[in-house]
Image: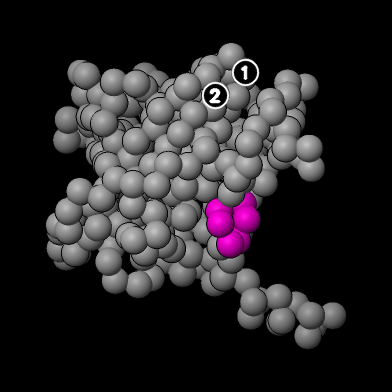
Amino acid sequence: MKYIFIYLLLILKIFGQEYSIQVLGFHICDVNQNITNSKRIDFSTQNRGLFDFFWPAKNNYSTEFDSQDYSIKKWNKNVNQGSYKKNLSAFLDSDKTMIYSNDQKLKLSPPVYTLFSLIAMIQSSDRGSIDARWYNYEHEGRVGKARFLWADSSNAWDGKDSILCDHYRFDILITDSSGVVKNNDYFMKYIINKNSVREVWVSKAKPKRIIAAKVELPFFNFYAQIIRNKELW
């Protein structure tokens, strides 16, 4: 038993990052990301300061994907936003149908990607393999297309140093919301706002990591900056 445990520790690789989210220069939220063996990404958000006092939220998201092409296998989320609490999950069955835990079903055309599987993919892929390529996209019952469009090579600040990055625009085009799973998840709602502009800066040096990200909305912007990079195992 001891040797099995040691073997599992040797093969298990977990890489994580911690981010600070700012609006108008104010720190409003902490985000943690862990990627395990290029098969699973865990993502959590926790509001902070006065923002947490007036708009408390602590959400957790988990996504499992194919280790070769990052297409979705299943996802789960736990949402705690004030008095609103919600658990929701879904998996892609052998019939190419997404089965949701609230008994809704949605026929898809695999390979299909989600926000989090694409976040995992961009941190392990070269620019040439993903630039300007459209991916079939699922977003809690909404379907459409998503792509990373390379803008330039530029520096982003990681809190200690200026890091040379590939700078992408992240486009999400929702074409069908008829199968939408109704919920009030603030994070997932704003990320696909049709009037938003999404940008991400990914370090050129390996291991790749997202150094910064920005979501520009009509009246305010969310800016995420890495504050800690860690190999958890």
Q: How would you classify the magenta stretch by its main secondary structure? A: loop
Q: Which residue is drawn at 42% across and 42% down?
A: 134
Q: Residue at x 33, y 26 (%)?
A: 51
**Picture coordinates of residue 30, whole percent (x, y):** 37, 42
Kindly identify which residue carries mark 2. Answer: 142
Amino acid under label 2?
Answer: Arg
Amino acid under label 1?
Answer: Gly
Kindly identify which residue carries mark 1. Answer: 179
**Picture coordinates of residue 87, whole percent (x, y):** 66, 28
Q: Residue 193 carries which label?
A: none
Label 2 crowding class (10 Å Cα cut-off): few <14, some 14-19, many 20+? some
Tag 1 or tag 2, which sits nearer the N-term?
A: 2
Examine the rendered structure and indicate whether residue 105 appears above or below residue 110: above
Tell me, yes or no, whether the highlighted magenta stretch contains residue 67.
Answer: yes
Q: Residue furthest bottom?
A: 3
**Colouring of the image:** one colour
Q: Are marks 2 and 1 in contact (CB under 8 Å)?
A: yes
132 or 88: nearer the viewer: 132
Examine the image and state in which quarter residue 20 appears.
Answer: top left
Examine the image and state in which quarter residue 140 appears.
Answer: top right
Examine the rendered structure and indicate whether residue 15 appears above or below residue 42: below
- Quadrant position of the N terminus in the picture: bottom right
Direction from residue 131 to residue 186 in the image, left or right: right
Q: What stretch is highlighted in magenta?
A: 65-70
Q: Residue at x 30, y 57 (%)?
A: 202
Residue 81 in view: no
Direction from residue 167 to residue 140 in the image, left or right: right
- Quadrant position of the C terminus in the picture: bottom right
Label 1 crowding class (10 Å Cα cut-off): few <14, some 14-19, many 20+? some
